Image (cartoon, helix red, strand yellow):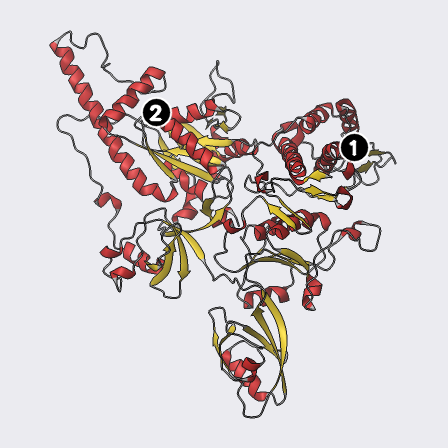
Amino acid sequence: MKQSADLINKLLVVSEKAARLSRACRQNGHLLSLLVQEKKNDEKNARFVKDFKTLADVLVQEMIKYDLEKEFPDLKNSIHGEENNTFTNTLGESVTVKLTDSKSNTVSFLEKILNGDTTAAHLMTKTMYDAVSIDDVPVHVLPDDGHYLDFTDLALWIDPIGKWIGCAFWGISVNDFSATSIPFQSFSVPSEHVIAISVSESDMNKNKLVKAGFKLISPAGAGHKILCVILGIVDAYILSQGTTYFWDTCGSHAILKSIKGNIWNYQKCLNHELVELSYCEKEEGQNIKQYSNKDGFIAYSGAIMIHQYKVISLVKQPDVPLGLTVEQDENGNVIVARVLAGSTIDKENLMHPGDIILEINGVNVESAEKLMNTVSECKSTLQIRIASKNDSDQMVKPQQCYVRALFNYYPQEDSLLPCEKLGLEFQIGDILQILDQKDPIWWQAKKVGGDGSVGLIPSTDLEERRKAYVPPEADYVHKIGICGARIARRKRKKMYQSKLNIEFDKADLFLYEEVTKMPPFKRRTLAIVGPPAVGRRTLKGRLINSNPEKFAGVIPVTSRPQREYEENGKNYWFVEREEMEKQIKQHKFLEYGEHNGNIYGTSLDSIRNVINEGRMCVLDCSPTALKILHNSAEFMPYVIFIAAAGMESLKNLHDYGRYNGYSTRTLTFDRQSSIRYSSRRARTLESLATLYEDEDIKKILEESSCLQRTYEKYIDTVIVNEDMDKTFLQIVEVLETLANQHQWVPVNWVY
């Protein structure tokens, strides 16, 4: 007998070890090259492995077995996985992969499997035996007195499915006891009714689901689809075919049960039987099919609207109406609008408002007219197939949509609003719950975290038409002027956004962004943006130096020739200009620019490498690059805008940078110089330098305001940098908050 918390901790530890092994295989150049070439079928050779990925999967499986059985001996022979751990070559020789306490033995058998590759054997062995600790596992949701498991009734199935936006989820369901790492009430509600299906699902089932008003999506992998159900991203996952196995569903099934969901046998559901998937009884046969979920399944969470499909029989009386009225929704479904009191349907409680009429006597009901004609043609019994709300699930959630507002709205200033008191005021960044979008002009909504009051907000169509008449920004940006002579602008690098922006620029008018609520997770990139000379690079360097294991920057790529004292990959990656131009055309750069005849750029692959190392990639990129980062689920950025402070604060930042050696900017005159008061001419020159510096600072203030206004739809946090130390601590605090609080993120990051 062992406590649940002990096992959960260990399972999360071995999962992290598996992730590290996977990262090592992708990031180490030598391991990545080990996609072994297949030999001809008739060629005899001593090579055991033809597919390096298979070996990696087997090592993950055996590493988990070894670690768990070592700490929980009662689980021996109760841990199963998909892969066969015995490899055989064409000479008839075989070797079985199994970890032991001896690292040297593990190295030896890996060398044999890898045909004598000592380097790869040592690299993989080190990764598998390195210690891993998990300090932030949320096992506090378990009862204080602990909960014990009888390991004689416990079996574990292993199926690595890859990480889910950096989060770890667990759930346990044993008899009447359930616990999970995520509070049930925090799950997202789908903005529309969505079903996850396999790409190979039958067209007949797809058509029926679409007709019933569901949106269909197909995330990769069964485990991934069930995670979407768990988090409320989809209503359900339907699989009519027996193409999955015990290890595909076992773990996620436990999480579903812990939140009052379940996985039902699909074929049994067709016969109106609710039979839960079981993992104790194998199917007939000796091969992998004995572990198959052969009847398919339906996975659902406890937060969705469940429909029960049923057939009712009704004897039609001559000249007696059915006793109901119907309407057709926007998806073409024929919906029961009202059941007349005293009618047969009412007395026998056969149908209710909201039920969907699918078929009558085997004929699809495609419209209200079709329903009326079919009923009138029938002379006797009506067999009516309907989709009705499950009586056992009274908590039916209305169709909802959550959006982030990307503009400010003040009802008192809106002359088109029917009544000022009906309007809902909101600011940029507010999360709005859209309750009703039927009206093409005004939507009904309420603010998340507000007082709960519902009000009218302009629809996308209305606001787009209004925005079309707003003058361009250049017409209202206030320019700060300065009397006297002006300094010519110093030559600066001109940065160009990646051509990927072309796709995003087609829809530059952003009003509302659909979002979904996610449990705490660590963002993959941190973008520190702002105007020049506000300390972005200083803050970036300080953050990376404070915790190099957690944060990392990228090494820029340049076409500039390498100098004698320079090391490739230290400060720059040096490539030929032709190669760099080729990569630019292939959209492989986040941003790039030309300076003194040489190209400099930030490679997207360099960002991916940092992310794959498990670290947050810190960027001080141009604001124009935010569009690519924001629109990609791959980078999941958190964007901090460093805003310019007042004149005196900016001067202090200049002094701070010069004192600490951070600033690359040099001035002609040093205000601390000993000649400051030595002559009238010196004082005149100093005054002129101060005048020019003041003008630069005013330009920075103007640019800061302009950039913040232009890119605020991508900005998560704005920090006014009045003090470098305080700003740094604010950034650290914000990043720590991300790991502990739920976050609203764009839906395209999750789907």
Q: Write the residue at 47% across / 71% down.
A: 329
Q: Residues within 10 Å of mark 2 (few under 14, many from 20)?
A: many
Question: In the orientation shown, which residue stands out farthest toward the bottom?
Answer: 318
Picture quadrant of residue 106: top right
Is residue 205 placed above or below 595 in the rendered structure? below
Residue 623, x across and y down, in percent: 37, 37
Q: Secondary structure at mark 1?
A: loop
Question: In the orientation shown, which residue stands out farthest toward the right?
Answer: 92
Three-letter residue code for mark 1:
Lys
Task: Mark yes or no: residue 568 visible.
Answer: yes
On residue 724, the disc is 2
Q: Write the residue at 16% across / 18% down.
A: 687
Is residue 656 placed above or below 260 in the rendered structure? above
Three-letter residue code for mark 2:
Met
For disc 1, the marked residue is 98
388 or 724, which lies in front? 388
Residue 242, x across and y down, in percent: 72, 57
Picture quadrant of residue 475: top left
**Taking 86 as reference, is 228 left or right?**
left
How far is mark 1 from mark 2, CA to CA? 54 Å
Residue 56, x across and y down, in percent: 70, 35
Picture quadrant of residue 33: top right
